[in-house]
Image: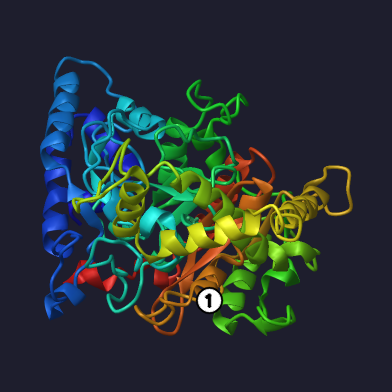
Amino acid sequence: MELCDLSAYEMSRMVRQREVSATEILHSCLERIARVDGRPGSLTPGEITEEDRQRVHAFLNVTGERALQQAQAIDQKIATGEDPGPLAGVPVAVKDLFCVKDTLTTAASRILSNFRAPYTATPVARMEAAGAVTIGKVNLDEFAYGSSNESSAYQPAPRNPWDTSRVPGGSSGGGAAAVAAGEAPLSIGTDTSGSIRQPAAFCGVVGLKPTYGRVSRYGLIAFASSIDSPGPIARDVTDTALMLQTIAGVDPADATSAAVPVDDYLAALEQGVKGMRIGLSPDYFRITFFDPETGEADQQPLPAEIEIAVRRAAEVLRGMGAEIIEDIPMPNTVYGIPAYFVVSRVEAASNLHRYDGVKYGVRTSEPVHDLRQMYRKSRGQGFGRQPKLRILMGMYVSAAQYSEQYYNRALKVRTLIRRDFDAVFDRTGQYRLDALLTPTTPTTAFPMGAVYGNSVLMQYADQLTVAANHAGVPAVSVPGGLDEQSLPIGIQFIGSDYSEAKILRIGRSYELGTQDEPWRGIKPSAVCV
Ligand code: GLN
C-alpha cells in the first residue's frame, strides 16, 4: 500500500501525529498521477493513441507548485505545534467547475479556456482552511452537461479506472476516476441530477449530494441554480463525512445556503441502524422511458444484478437491526427526467447568457463589424454541442407561448416529486422512513461511445438520482458490489432534509456489514498496472 492509497482520515491523523509529512503524501499522489493518469485533457489533443486508451485522464491541470506550497505550509504548522485542521495534508482534486484563485477554471469548455478565477469557491476555501491541499483541477462534461464525461472540450476524456474502455460517468467523472485510482483521496463535485452519485457508482466510490443549500454554491460555475449541489466524493463513508463536515454550513456569499446548524457527521457514524426504518420502492426497480412522439411510457426492469445488490444490502441492514419496509410508493419518480429536461435547460440557457466574449472567457479573434456579430462568433466558437443544444431547448420551452405547457408544468411536477418524499419521511405518516434504499443507476458503467450522441438516452442514466435534486433532499451512493464484468454497482440512500448524518450512518453500517465480502478486496485495474 502506498501513501496515496490511505484514507483522508488516516492521512490527516498521520500528518497531525508527525508520522508522515504533508509533502510526502503529496508526492505519493503526484507519483500515482504520473503513473496512471496519462496526458491531461487538451483542446488540441491530436490522435487518441493506444496508450491513451489505457490511462485515466482525470486531470485537466495538476497544480503541483501551488499544492507544494500548501503542503509545506501544513508541515510548517506541524513543526511549530499548530494544528492545521481536520484535513491536514489531504490532497483534494477539484472539479473544474469551482473557482480556485489564480488558477485556470474552464468548466471543460473552450469558452472559458483562458479564465483565471479571481477568487476561490467557498467549499474549496473551507477545505483549504481545514488543511487540505488542492492538487489540481479534474475534467468534467462541458459545463457539467452530461453523464459520461465525453462531452468535455478537453480530450482525451476521463476513463473508468475499473475498465478504461468504459466511461467514468458524469459530470463529476474526472473526480470519481481520480479518487478510485488513488490519485487523490477526496474530490469535490457537483450534483444537479446525479453528477456526483452516478460517477461515484460507476467508479466504485462514495458520492454524496447534500440537501440543497447545505453547501455553498459561491464560486461554482452555475448550471441549474435551483438544484446545483456541491458535495464530496471519497473512497469510504468516513472520509465523506469528514469532508462534508468542513464544507457544510451557511455562507453569507450564497443567499440560498441554509442557516441550519451543521451536525457532527463523524460522531454519528458508528451508531448503527438498530430501529431505523429503511424503505424499498418498486418505482426504483424499473426504468421508464417516455416516447418523445406519443408520450407513451415504456417500462423496463433494471438488470437483475443491480436489483439483487440492493436487496442484499437491505438484508445486511436488516441483520444489523434495521426494519425494512417494502412497497413504498414513489409514483412521481418516472417524471423526474422529463421535468429535469425542461427545468435544467431553462436555467442552463439563462446562466449561459453571461458568456459573451466581453466579461470573461474567450472572444473571437476573427474580424467583426458590430457588437452582435462579436457575441455570435464568440459564443458560436466557444460553446460545444451540449451548451448549444441546451440554449436552444431552454429558450424554446421558456418562451412566452410555450412556458405554460413546459416550464410551468415542470415546476408543478417538481412539487409532486417533493410530495412523494414528504409522505414517506413524515414522522406521523404511514411509512415514517429514515431512508429509502435504491439503486443509484439503471446500469453499470457503459462503454465509451455507446450512449454519447443521444442526449435523451444519456439523460436516463440519472433517472434514479434526479428525484432527490427536484426535492432538494440529501442522497448518498455507496459501493454495493461488482457485476459479472467486475464493474462497480452503486446503491443509494436517500433521506429527508438535512439528514446527512443519518444516511451516512446507514452507509457506514452497510460498509461494516459487508467488510469481509470478497469484492471489497478487489481494486480497479488501472491501479494494478
Ligand atoms: N446528466 C446531467 C445532464 O446532462 C448532468 C447531471 C448533473 O448533475 N450535472 O444534465
Give coordinates of residue 452: x percent, y percent: 41, 76
Specify the quadrant of the image occupied by residue 166: bottom left
Check disc 1 and report the residue beneath it.
457
Q: Residue at x 44, y 84 (%)?
A: 484
411 or 480, which lies in front? 411
Q: Residue at x 31, y 55 (%)?
A: 377
In this orientation, does residue 304 appear? yes
304 or 365, which lies in front? 365
- Disc 1 marks a residue whose amino acid type is Leu
Q: Residue at x 60, y 48 (%)?
A: 503
Q: Specify the quadrant that holds the C terminus.
A: bottom left
Give coordinates of residue 162: x percent, y percent: 32, 72
Give coordinates of residue 60: x percent, y percent: 22, 54
**Mark 1 residue element:** helix
Give coordinates of residue 283: x percent, y percent: 73, 70
Q: Residues within 10 Å of mark 1 (few under 14, many from 20)?
A: few
